[in-house]
Amino acid sequence: MKLVTEQFGIGEPVLLIHGMGSAATAWKLIIPELRKTNLAITVDLPGHGKSPMDFAQPMDPQSLAELVFRNMDELGIDKFHVVGNSLGGWVALEMAALKPERIKSLLGIAPAGLWLTPFTTRTSARTRVLSRLVNPIAPFTVHFESLRKLGFESVSPLWRNFSHQTCLDATRAMANAEGYYPAWDAMLKKRFNGKIPKTVPTTIIFGDADNSLPAQSCQERSLAPAHAKWIIFSECGHAPMWDHPEEVLIEINNLIGISN
């Protein structure tokens, strides 16, 4: 299927892949700076953002990796850097394992899939339910701190600093994500088992307050590439590109410099 992509700037191509229940809008805080020196490419996964849901499309991370490669082929882009958050981070890992010759560097931002014991059932979908309830009046409700706290306190210790636009984008993305449950079900009983060669410079970032993928169960370093640089951001939740966008940009540029 054809995914919706957008391109910003010129230079080294950097593909940005969002997480489950999110969308390309998740990268708004880093695109203005990234586009100054690079070609930033966003993609909406099936049933997320502007991409329609095709229920014939397998939603497991490896199949999504293959789908994203096909869409990059359509754009005429052979080799590129890839940055992924959460599910997008897992997809990025699979891409580097499947076709390492095409991946110039990899940044996994709180990537899913790094657990020894895979999930066998869905956990709470509280955020999805809440976002669907408030979505019709989201531009109004996200002005209230009590409602922002309800929706974002578990996402980040810095949720009070989130802008109205960040909260609105995240609420709309989650509420409208038809691919949310298909993606979740496709991750069950799986983990990342691929092998990424040293030819792909790799950095993994997690926040010290990631409640979605906690350190004790979802940050198994032995499943990541042995050569990966592993960083823990302080005062940071599951979306470091919201909590510390400047530091994320530094790590992207560091990888680009290494690969060159």
Image (cartoon, rainbow, N blue to C red):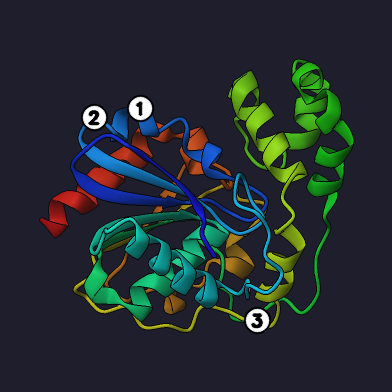
Q: Circle 1 sits in a helix, a strand or a loop, which is it?
A: helix
- What residue is at 65 percent from the left and 54 percent from the top? 52
Mark 2 vs mark 3, foreground winner is: 2
Q: Badge 1: few (under 14), some or many (20 or more) residues near its Cα, within 10 Å?
A: few
Total marks shown come to: 3
Task: Report whether residue 194 is seen.
Answer: yes
Amino acid marked by disc 1: Pro
Residue 216 position in % (x across, y down): 61, 66
Amino acid marked by disc 3: Thr
- What residue is at 69 percent from the left and 83 percent from the top? 189
Distance in Å between CA atoms under marks 3 and 1: 38 Å
What residue did someone put label 2 on?
Answer: 36
Q: Circle 3 sits in a helix, a strand or a loop, which is it?
A: loop
Question: Which label number is shown at residue 117?
Answer: 3
Residue 152 position in % (x across, y down): 71, 35
Q: Badge 2: few (under 14), some or many (20 or more) residues near its Cα, within 10 Å?
A: few
> Where 214 falls versus 169 (above or below)?
below
In the picture provided, is 130 more to the left or to the right than 84? right
> Where 20 falls versus 138 (above or below)?
below
Amino acid marked by disc 2: Lys
- N-terminal of the pair, mark 3 or mark 1, is 1
Residue 1, quarter of the rendered image:
bottom right
Question: Which label number is shown at residue 32?
Answer: 1
The answer to whether the residues at label 2 and label 1 have Cβ atoms under 8 Å apart is: yes
